[in-house]
Image: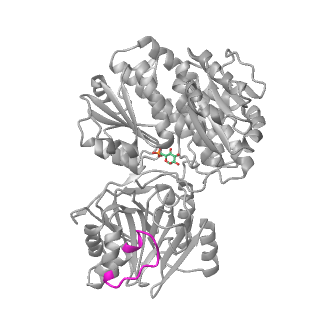
Amino acid sequence: MCGIIAAASTRNVGKLLVQGLHKMEYRGYDSAGIALHQENSIAHLRALGKVQLLEDMMISEKPKSKLGIAHTRWATHGEPSEVNAHPHKSKDKVYIVHNGIIENYIELKEALVKDGYEFSSQTDSELIAHLLDSFLEKGNSMIDAMYLAKEKLEGAYAIAAIDIDNNNSLVVARNKSPLLLGIGTDEILAASDPLAIGQLTNEFVFLEDGDVAEISAESYKIFDENKKEVEREITNIDISSQATSKGDYKHFMEKEIYEQPEAILNTLDGRVGGDDILDNIFGLGSSELFAKAKRIQIVACGTSLHAGRVAANWLSSIAELPCQIDYASEYRYRNPHVDENSLLITISQSGETADTLAALRYAKEKDYLGSVSICNVPTSSLARESDFVLFTNAGPEIGVASTKAFTTQLAGLMLLVLSLAKSRNLNPKLRTRIITALRTLPEVINETLALKEKILDLAPAIASKDNALFLGRGIFYPIAKEGALKLKEISYIHAEAYPAGELKHGPLALIDEDMPVIALAPESEIAEKLVSNLEEVKARGGTLYVFADPSVKMDVKNGAFISMPKCDFFLTPIIYTIPLQILSYEVALLRGTDIDQPRNLAKSVTVE
Ligand code: G6P
């Protein structure tokens, strides 16, 4: 999704701004642009497509500047095009970059048009440049203009702005869209993602909603929503030491799939002791709070929601708690009734997903016992705004299609379920059984990754089709959904998932030689019923690819039967996810798609 980087420096900033844009490419974008202050003019370059195209323009034009703003855009209002790419400008004087959505843009635009402003793009963002210009024209400073603009703007935004009359400083503002400052040796930076500036500094200042900051090469000032100058804490994070290179892998996604044994180890590290879960792993007082929980509400989006669906099943079986689960984008709009002693759980890799954050903020106004988050990014808004957090410690995930973030979320959710069960004095033997299984999980994942050669044999048959059906039952239905999501995201093959028992109620009509069926058949009390469902596919000439426990009796002639490593039933969803990730990756590789940055998608979705 959109990315902002801005810098005021004692040296040339063009190159470092473009390098910062490269670091944010993983978020997903369709165009890129830059505005560089050159004392008497502002160099303005924009390109539809990859950041590399913008970089090529920079190499040929060689603009020199010590103050600039740059952006990668992910279209919301207006198609991906050069004219809709940021920075946007007003009268060659004011240039802005914007992340988020201005909800009242039609009304603001109409008023600006009446005042004589001409719009050249279809975006909601351009009006911010004109609005700032209208206030600067009246003699306001950029800081004052930003506050006046904020009074008018409704919605979410992170903004960085420069104007022709000031080549010393730039101004940024944040409301419900991530923005932070970085204190470098030769410059002060601003960015929407710490990864963008992690090569230049370890010192970050996370702005809060309502904040406006003025940045020059040597100093910065932050003002809060009431325009009062404030000090915000400096956080030290060594991002450059966090692996953000592909190493010997072809894609980040591939690397992240094979990193899973270590990632899971990191999730478990320091959280299990002896044969039980340790107390308060979600923060001081969390075990006490968990003892009061009578009901759970989960909200999340995308892959994180699938992790939540598995957890809902675990919560019921292991912690004996009823659980309601909602898409974060839907939760607020169904007038949710909150029972006494309900706990809110949010799940998010990035911790910046706008819908999930909005759901958390909405829920905080309701009568929940507290909010608990499972998150991968310690500096994220979700982590900072939740009462209790467990970090999955998966390390940066760069591939848009989530892999290690998902399996570590599952491991983290299992830790949550075990913590709840322990606080409620429930199922000690089962807890010990699961803890023992968790300790061997990285080994079992390694065994599963070794299935790659077998999966490579299946990939061409799937890659040549336009559709696929994924089947699972019970706790494996969300894993089938995650498998279908992975395949459609990166290979652009249309894929759907069904609980296998539902097949006869509709999807069976789709079965023919062009509809491969990928099924998950672990050892379970309903294994036989699942096999009967798969026989229905066989009987209609369907092609079956079955990932199954060796004990499952099934004769697959048309397709393949792949035996899966053994592990405790409750952890099998984690294991059965792995071959589906590898399959999607290998299929996408054969189809030649942009695996790490699939078309139209974004890694961190910061608009509702
Ligand atoms: C985007 C990503 C998905 C992710 C979803 C939720 O759609 O492409 O991979 O599952 O957002 O993101 P979150 O960071 O909240 O887990």
| Highlighted magenta segment, given as a residue range | 114-127
Question: Picture coordinates of residue 318 (x, y %)?
Answer: 42, 19
Residue appearing at x 37%, y 31% in the figure: 324
Question: Picture coordinates of residue 89 (x, y %)?
Answer: 43, 78
Q: Is residue 3 above or below residue 590?
A: below
Residue appearing at x 36%, y 72% in the figure: 128
Question: Picture coordinates of residue 172 (x, y %)?
Answer: 36, 67
Asked if the magenta segment contains residue 126, the reply would be: yes
Q: Quadrant of residue 467?
A: top right
Q: Is residue 423 visible?
A: yes
Asked if the magenta segment contains residue 362, the reply would be: no
Predominant secondary structure in magenta?
A: loop
Question: Picture coordinates of residue 385 (x, y %)?
Answer: 32, 45
In front of the other: 388 or 576: 576
Q: Is residue 256 visible?
A: no
In front of the other: 554 or 210: 554
- Total marks placed: 0
In front of the other: 332 or 251: 332
Q: Is residue 497 above or below residue 288?
A: below
Colouring used for the render = one colour
